[in-house]
Amino acid sequence: MKNKAIFYHAGCPVCLSAEQQIVDAIDTNRFELEVVHLGEERERISEAEDAGINSVPALLLNGTVLHLNFGASLNDVKGVS
Amino acid sequence: MKNKAIFYHAGCPVCLSAEQQIVDAIDTNRFELEVVHLGEERERISEAEDAGINSVPALLLNGTVLHLNFGASLNDVKGVS
């Protein structure tokens, strides 16, 4: 049985092309891939929430949530403010 | 020639296992994959910055930056505050 990957998004026009690159990069020989537009499939928002998704775009890999966006700045890594 | 995927992180112990799942999911038949720990390879921070990376963890796919983390809340998608 293949692993399951679900990409949730909300149609953000700026981000969509970039984030679909991650979809393109996923090994579809090993992962069954589904893309869900929560703006259009609003009945699936609760499913996404139950999976632990707090924001979109997000990738759900075998039940593990990966939020795609902006995190800690590299200045934090460098130790400068 | 293979596409190039570079995963930059800073060793966050909580996030690392989750985010390495994305590394595991990448199709290595099509992508040459490199993982860079910027906390240990600090000389590569400027390379990451030049690529447009503002935060870690991040995935660089053929020059396109994907920041992995927390973005817009699903409440924004729902339209509630």
Image: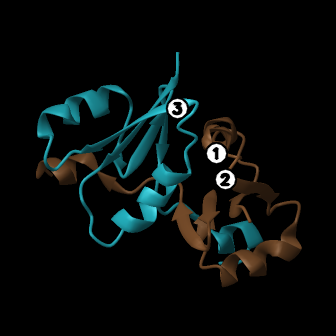
Chain colours: A brown, B cyan
Q: Amino acid at mark 1?
A: Asp
Compared with residue A74, is residue B3 higher up or lower down, i.e. above or below? above
| Spot occupied by residue A47 in the image (x, y as percentages of width and height) | 76, 79
Q: Is residue A69 visible?
A: no
Compared with residue A22, is residue A47 higher up or lower down, i.e. above or below? below
Which residue in the structure is indicated by mark 3? Answer: B31
Number of the label disc, if any, that sits on residue B76: none
Q: Amino acid at mark 3?
A: Phe
| Spot occupied by residue A4 in the image (x, y as percentages of width and height) | 70, 64
Do discs 1 and 2 share a chain? Answer: yes
In the image: residue B46, left or right of residue B7 = left
Which residue in the structure is indicated by mark 2? Answer: A30
Name of the residue lying farthest toward the top: B1
Name which residue lies at 58% across and 30% down.
B30
Q: Are marks 1 and 2 in contact (CB under 8 Å)?
A: yes
Q: Chain of mark 1?
A: A
Q: Residues within 10 Å of mark 2 (few under 14, many from 20)?
A: some
Name which residue lies at 11% across and 52% down.
A79
Q: Dot 2: what SS? A: loop
How far is disc 3 from disc 1 in space, using C-alphas?
10 Å
Q: Chain of mark 3?
A: B
Q: Residues within 10 Å of mark 3 (few under 14, many from 20)?
A: some
Q: Amino acid at mark 2?
A: Arg
* Residue B18 in which image quadrant: bottom left
Compared with residue A66, is residue B9 higher up or lower down, i.e. above or below? above
Compared with residue A68, is residue A19 higher up or lower down, i.e. above or below? above
Number of the label disc, if any, that sits on residue A27: 1
| Spot occupied by residue A12 in the image (x, y as percentages of width and height) | 70, 47
Name of the residue lying farthest toward the bottom: A50
Q: Chain of mark 2?
A: A
How far is disc 1 from disc 2 in space, using C-alphas?
6 Å
